[in-house]
Image (cartoon, helix red, strand yellow):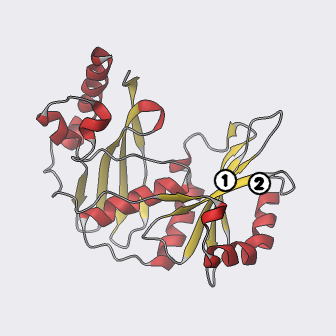
Amino acid sequence: MRALLLKSLTMLLLGCSSILFSQTRSPELVAPPVLTRVSPAGMTAAEKDTLKASQRALDKLMDVYNFEPKTPWTFEVVRCPLITKHVVMEFTSIEVSEGSSRYVAVLPQQNGRVQLIPLWYRGLRSFEKPYNDPHNIATFNETIAVEAPHLSSDTDWLQLAVCYLAMVGESPDVLLRTNIRRQLGDVSQNTVERLLPVVTPSQSSIDVHFCDAGQKRRISEWHLTFDRAGLLRAAPARDAPAHRG
């Protein structure tokens, strides 16, 4: 197990080297990014009202993407502290004999249009890499243009990256100084430093790079580029091929 972990870390560090070793580490983050998933029972009155007001438009979009409104669906509200003027909800169909379908709905709390991000259709990916789908990036950017979040720290930019990934069905567990050893075991201090997030500003953009050990026990790295207003310009990712054992 330890040999597999070391192999995974070695490959990840080599893959990250062009980014991680050439830049200065970000200052210590004030707080880890927050992402809360809430069952229907935990919805606020405002969230329920938003869903009710958006239902007709949402049904029309479901028809556009061939999702069947009459199929039983379960859902969660996905709360991100930078998104306060919309309700983000992830829906999953309950299927007996076929693979499930899944999509994310972005519902405006006041004026604006309902939007839908398709993720799975009867067990098949709607787009091979949803985080790179131009439609999904455009949906996020339209949402953020309305939200106009205050982005003043590295913590804010990392939070924004996590919010985007949540909108495309991801649940990254960002590796931070406070959780790396809990996630990866007894690794060296040098490895800890190399795996910390990097937030790199330039005159016109902000690059956010971090590592994630969340889904399927696989270490992934994410690199997202935003403009100064928080609009996403690119969202590629590269997975380390080895599992952590």
Disc 1 secondary structure class: strand
Question: Looking at the figure, which quarter contains the N terminus?
Answer: top left
For this orientation, the residue located farthest to the front is 41
Residue at 87% x, 55% y: name it.
70
For disc 2, the neighbor class at 10 Å (few under 14, some 14 to 19, many from 20) is some
- The image quadrant of residue 44 is bottom right
Image quadrant in which the C terminus is located: top left
What whole-number distance in Å separates the C-alpha atoms at marks 2 and 1?
Answer: 10 Å
Residue at 66%, 62% in the rendered image: 40
**Label 2: element kind:** loop
Height in image: 29 above or below 96?
below
Question: Percent x, y for residue 26?
Answer: 18, 55
- Answer left or right for 124 relative to 83: right
Task: From the image, state whether disc 2 or disc 1 is nearer to you.
Answer: 1
Q: Circle 1 is placed at which residue position? A: 103
Disc 1 crowd rating (10 Å Cα; few below 14, some 14-19, many 20+) is many
Please tell me which residue is depicted at 57% across the width and 64% down the height of the picture. 139
Residue 171 badge: none
Q: Amino acid at mark 1?
A: Tyr
Q: Quadrant of residue 116?
A: bottom right
Q: Amino acid at mark 2?
A: Tyr
Label 2 or label 1, whichever comes before in sequence order: 2
- Identify the residue under disc 2: 65
Query: Relative to residue 200, is residue 104 drawn left or right?
Result: right
Q: How far from the left and from the top, in percent, is residue 180? A: 26, 40
Kindly check if marks 2 and 1 are in contact, taking CB atoms under 8 A apart as contact. yes
Residue 208 in view of the camera: yes
